């Protein structure tokens, strides 16, 4: 595993999140995650990517629970 203070490029971060790189860039520019720019390249800390991944997972679980409850009614 990588150290939590590791700095990633957008391709690496997108692979961890299992999303496309262009979609990740849109999320970054919409200020969903903190990032820095090195010239024209976005750089993201691994800890922020992992926090966002957990947030996405939690949201998915809540939505699935809601759908399961709705289907039981």
Image: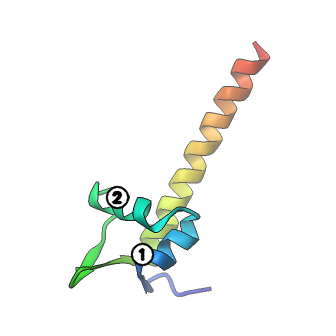
CA separation, marks 1 and 2? 11 Å
Residue at (24% x, 79% y) in the render:
37
- 16 horizontally vs 24: left or right: right
Q: Nearer the viewer, residue 44 or 26?
A: 26
Q: Is residue 59 above or below residue 65?
A: below
Q: Position of residue 3 (x, y in %)?
A: 52, 87
Q: Is residue 64 above or below residue 11?
A: above
Q: Position of residue 66 (x, y in %)?
A: 64, 28
Q: Is residue 65 above or below residue 35?
A: above
- Which residue corresponds to mark 1? 10
Q: Nearer the viewer, residue 2 or 15?
A: 15
Q: Residue furthest left?
A: 39
Mark 1 or 2, nearer chain start: 1
10 Å crowding of disc 1: few (<14), some (14-19), many (20+): many
- Which residue corresponds to mark 2? 26
Q: Quadrant of residue 67?
A: top right
| Quadrant of the frame with the N terminus | bottom right
Q: Residue furthest right?
A: 72
Q: Secondary structure at mark 2?
A: helix
């Amino acid at each position: 595993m990588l150290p939590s203070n590791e700095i990633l490029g957008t391709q690496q971060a997108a692979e961890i999140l299992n999303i496309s790189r262009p979609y990740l860039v849109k999320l970054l520019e919409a200020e969903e995650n903190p990032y820095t720019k090195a010239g024209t390249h976005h750089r993201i800390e691994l800890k922020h990517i992992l926090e966002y991944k957990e947030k996405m997972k939690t949201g998915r679980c809540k939505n699935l629970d809601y759908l399961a409850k709705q289907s039981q009614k």
